[in-house]
Amino acid sequence: MQCDELWSFVDHKGNKQWVWLALDAETREIIGAYVGSRSAESAQKLWDSLPKVYRQCAVIYTDAWEAYRQVLPSKRHRVVSKSSGKTSYIERFNNTLRQRVSRFVRRSLAFSKR
């Protein structure tokens, strides 16, 4: 399982909201999601959104964000860098969201004549 988060804003840029996602690396299915702040409480809500079978036996790959360390069980949690490739599917999914959902688009990823 791979977990990551991406941000957008609601109403104005000062109101950042984080979309927390969990993806099954084998099936490429989103198995858990939560929208909230970038806190340990939100990481806990993502953990709670996962099916019981994943919470019991899945190995979880994430980046080094501290909220994951506080919430995920240390026996199955693996902190990896983006260059390791262990979170590549969730990173690709987040990039696809940024390309296709207008709320998530960044200027550096979208075509512009400016």
Image (cartoon, rainbow, N blue to C red):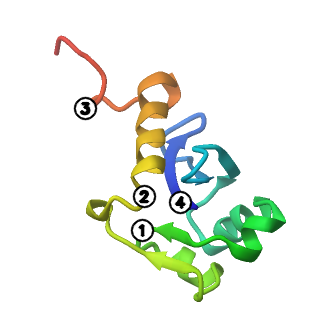
- Asked which quadrant contains residue 81, the reply is bottom left
Viewer-side label of 3, 1: 1
Q: Position of residue 37 (x, y in %)?
A: 61, 59
Dots 1, 2 in contact, CB < 8 A: yes
Query: Mark 3: few, some, or many residues within 10 Å (few <14, many ≥20)?
Result: few
Q: Quadrant of the C terminus?
A: top left
Q: Position of residue 42 (x, y in %)?
A: 67, 65
Q: Is residue 105 above or below residue 4?
A: above
> Residue under circle 4?
2
Furthest residue to the top?
113
> Residue under circle 3?
108
Decide which of tag 3 and tag 1 comes sooner along the chain.
1
Q: CA distance from mark 4 to mark 3?
A: 25 Å
Whether residue 91 sits left or right of residue 49 in the image: it is: left
Decide which of tag 1 and tag 4 comes sooner along the chain.
4
Q: Position of residue 6 (x, y in %)?
A: 49, 49
Whether residue 109 sits left or right of residue 64 in the image: it is: left
Dots 3, 1 in contact, CB < 8 A: no
- Residue at image location 30% in from the left, 23% down from the top: 110
Decide which of tag 4 and tag 3 comes sooner along the chain.
4
The three-letter amino acid code for the residue at tag 1 is Asp
Count of numbered circles in the view: 4
Q: CA distance from mark 2 to mark 3?
A: 22 Å
